[in-house]
Image (cartoon, rainbow, N blue to C red):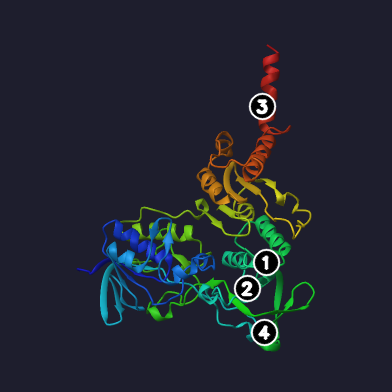
Amino acid sequence: MPVDYDLAIVGGTLAGRWAALHAAQMGARVVLAEPPSPQPRLASETLPLGQGAALAEGVMGHGSVVLSVSALAVNGVDVVLESPVFEAMQPVRLRVGDRHLSARRGLLAMAGAVRRYDLPAVMACQPCTPADFSATAWPQRVALVGAQAATVEWATALIQRGIAVTLVPPGQRILPAEDIDIQRLVTAQLRALGVRWGMPTHGVLADGQIGLKAAADDRPISVERVVLTDSSPPDLAGLNLPGLATSGPLSVNAYLQTQYSDLYAIGAVLGGEDRLALARAEAEIATENALFWHRRVLRYDRLHYSLRALTPIGRAGLTEQQARRYCNEVAVYQSGAAGQLRSAPVMLDAAADCAMDFCKLVVADGLLVGVHLMGESAEVAIALLAPYLGQSPDRLVNARVNGLEDSNGLAGQIDGALAQYRDRRWRPGTWRRDWAENWFNWRRSR
């Protein structure tokens, strides 16, 4: 049956726009139905770091690629800024305003909803965006409700502008998706710079200020603005897709295909962290599988990304906790500030620079399965080390990590972790040491 498009994307995120551009560049005819909104679409991009205004205007960049509506149109993408409704599948049929569109395949790339917490009503403030933080009206005391990477990035941006920050993470733990030592280091760093952990109270203080209490000692804390930083999977109830879960993350197969054979899903629809690197990988793989055939599988354990914390963070592969849960014979090699965290928390001087360098290598069954970095060069280093995932660490030992020149910084900690790996392999009692000693004894006896 003839169709209007090869791919119809229900968007509202950078992932959806990237998928549309990727499909158009391969020669496909693409329509992007995106609900109109002036707000940025990805948590990792909704930071008051000087880019919020550009994002709010629809100019979304990834490297040298601009993902604005006009740029997509120039590349052949039909962009419809209205909310779509599915009318049928096989082929995909959409009603977008007064238009009825048909496509061979569909892709869900909707923005996540603001996560709702079981908190008193006083915390149910309207979420704010970077547009609320104008140069002339900065709130001086802000509470961030959440625990994901976006929460830490918001805290970083606010601290750098001299704003007092209170974190209200559910469960009192931040960065739950990251390695436990990264969690502890970031927590220690934030506390050293004056960030407080808070809990909500049931009242509003004088002058309309919002009431909190400190998690440690129940002392009152007042803030002027609450920012809900975490997101949850979008509500799909209005799309007219019977059989799909209307709340919570969707289930997809290894090819990012939903239970509808002609419908794929990426990004916030699947849950998880809003990382631009993850969104791009999902967008490219789902798009190619939808347009051609099921030829690509996404390996989340081989992806890498970075976080904009006070000290940049790089992560590739599995955390130590994940490796111990799913793998056998797990060994950890680490060097840097977190070495003492297993016995006692790190105490930082609030007046110091608070910069720290840390490297953790997670090895399971003789293969490198995880790399966790913290340092000024973490974004560069993680891109250099990620290709060694799934290989023997010997390959990494024998390779030189180019691009990291500071031997006293992160590069030195990477060398330190690799030195631990070399030393442990040749300790007395290991099979390599026993084999070598037998070899030398045999040579000496001849």
- Residue position for label 1: 173
- Residue 441: name its quadrant: top right
- Residue position for label 3: 435
- Residue position for label 4: 209
Which mark's residue is nearer the viewer, 4 or 1? 4
- Quarter holding the C terminus is top right
Q: Using the numbered discs, state the Cα–Cα distance from disc 4 to disc 1 in whole angstroms.
A: 25 Å
Could you tell whether 292 is left or right of 414 in the image? left
Q: Using the numbered discs, state the Cα–Cα distance from disc 1 to disc 2 in whole angstroms.
A: 13 Å
Which mark's residue is nearer the viewer, 2 or 3? 2
Q: Earlier in the sequence, mark 4 or mark 2?
A: 2
Q: Are marks 1 and 2 in contact (CB under 8 Å)?
A: no
Amino acid at dot 4:
Gln
- Residue position for label 2: 144
Q: Residues within 10 Å of mark 1 (few under 14, many from 20)?
A: some
Asked if 168 appears above or below 316 in the picture, the reply is below
Amino acid at dot 1:
Arg
Which mark's residue is nearer the viewer, 1 or 2? 2
Badge 3 element: helix
Asked if 121 appears above or below 111 in the picture, the reply is below
Rendered location of residue 159, percent (x, y): 64, 66
In-front residue for pair 100/384? 384
Could you tell whether 437 is left or right of 106 in the image? right
Amino acid at dot 3:
Trp
Q: Using the numbered discs, state the Cα–Cα distance from disc 3 to disc 4 in whole angstroms.
A: 70 Å
